[in-house]
Amino acid sequence: MAPAVYADEGFFADEQERLFGRAWVCVALTAELARPGRLLVRSIGGRSVLLTRTDDGLVGFLNSCRHRGTELAEADCDIAQTIRCPYHRWHYSVDGRLVATPMFDSVPRDDFDPADFGLVPVRVDSWGPFVFACLNADTPPLAQWLGDLDERMAGYGFDEWQPAAPSPADCTFEPAANWKLIFENFAEYYHLGWVHPELAKMSRPEDHHRYQGPGMYCGQTTTPISSDERDDWLTLPAANGLDASDAASGRFIALFPNVLIAVLPSHAFVMRLEPVSAGRTIEHCSFVIPPGTSPASDEAGAQQFAEAFEVTRRFWIDVNDEDIDICERAQRGIARGGAPPGPLAPRFEEPLNRFHKMTADLMTLETVAELAVPAGDRPGGIDLYGSDPNPMPPAAEAATASSAPEAPATATS
């Protein structure tokens, strides 16, 4: 994509409206809304939204009072089942109904019905340990957006995974780089040997394979994970019941537009991207682990888990620091130099072509009701462009791999 796509503030403003304003955006972990009475404040496409839980499930609203538009909450907080406007004390129930308008009826109005002035709803849904929100009514449902991810990740029991620990295990960074550069960096492994020499000992480029079917995501997998020289990401206990492929692999999913998920047998490192400007992004990082692997109740067990977790946590923070440095360099080169873009490497950067097309669709479609979710790779390696087939294909691919046609001799784009 052209330099302006990453560096121009005018493009960034359009992108907030047309892309983030129409996408399913990851806004939180489900654990953050595990109990009623918790209210989260998030920004999506330049709009502030509220998220909370009712007895019936997750709900979302624009963060704006229906009286005169006042911001209802400025940060995450606890509420007593009521959302109150700080200005004139209009009260809303957690399902968005207007339930109190103090002193408003001192002079009655015949044209006022509280039922007409509930909070403006925002679409909210969840998958695995993630909460998503969408501002646009025409965007396909989240299940369609995810494509085959639910099937592809079924063996992990992702719905049951929980945060490994409260803060300070979670952490936030603010790289001076466009969000797309961070997404692209995660989605490709061309840079691995030079930017991440230690990571490349465990996640070797030759052991990378594509991991993507239909859906609004880019995927790759390391199969098998190597622990010959370092085992920093294998120190935690693995999930129970994994099949042979999941137990031996690292899955790396860049879910469009803003959540990056590195899933190992024992944990997942999650990064939620929040664009701030054309040249700045907030990374909200967290760790989730499968059920039954949390620290033992005794002090010795808890200490053992804490030490193992710290090795894993430190490993990912070091890797992310390397990524931040190179993404900031890329941003400076694009913004200050602005050279025309060159070709992508088909073997290592095909996911970027997929990402660019998804970006172009959201930016150019008149209505997202017309959005065509990418069909994904055909089974059997026909689209792999120089990569050997996965020696341990995931369950979602194994059944059809043997019947697929031969891969083409040359790559096309």
Image (cartoon, rainbow, N blue to C red):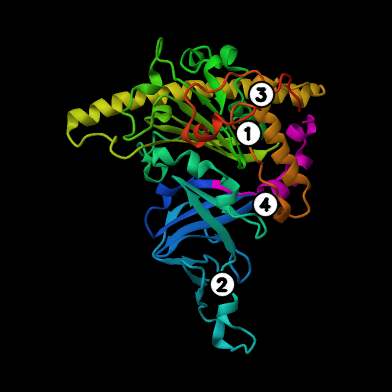
CA distance for labels 3 and 4: 36 Å
Residue under pointer 4: 22
CA distance for labels 3 and 1: 10 Å
Secondary structure mainly formed by the magenta segment: helix
Q: Mark 3, mark 4: which one is toward the viewer?
A: 3
Residue under pointer 2: 118
- Inspect the image, locate mark 4, and give the three-letter code of the amino acid beneath it: Arg
- Inspect the image, locate mark 1, and give the three-letter code of the amino acid beneath it: Arg
Q: Seen in the image, is 266 located left or right of residue 342?
A: left
Residue under pointer 1: 378
- Inspect the image, locate mark 3, and give the three-letter code of the amino acid beneath it: Ala
CA distance for labels 2 and 4: 23 Å
404 and 160: which is toward the camera? 404
Which stretch is magenta?
A: 1-26
Q: Earlier in the sequence, mark 1 or mark 2?
A: 2
> Which element is circle 1 on?
loop
Mark 3 crowdedness (10 Å alpha carbons): few <14, some 14-19, many ≥20: some
State the residue lying farthest toward the top: 229
36 and 260: which is toward the camera? 260
User: Contact (CB < 8 A) between labels 2 and 4?
Assistant: no
CA distance for labels 1 and 4: 28 Å
Q: Where's residue 163, x and y in %?
A: 38, 40
Q: Earlier in the sequence, mark 2 or mark 4?
A: 4
Q: Earlier in the sequence, mark 3 or mark 4?
A: 4
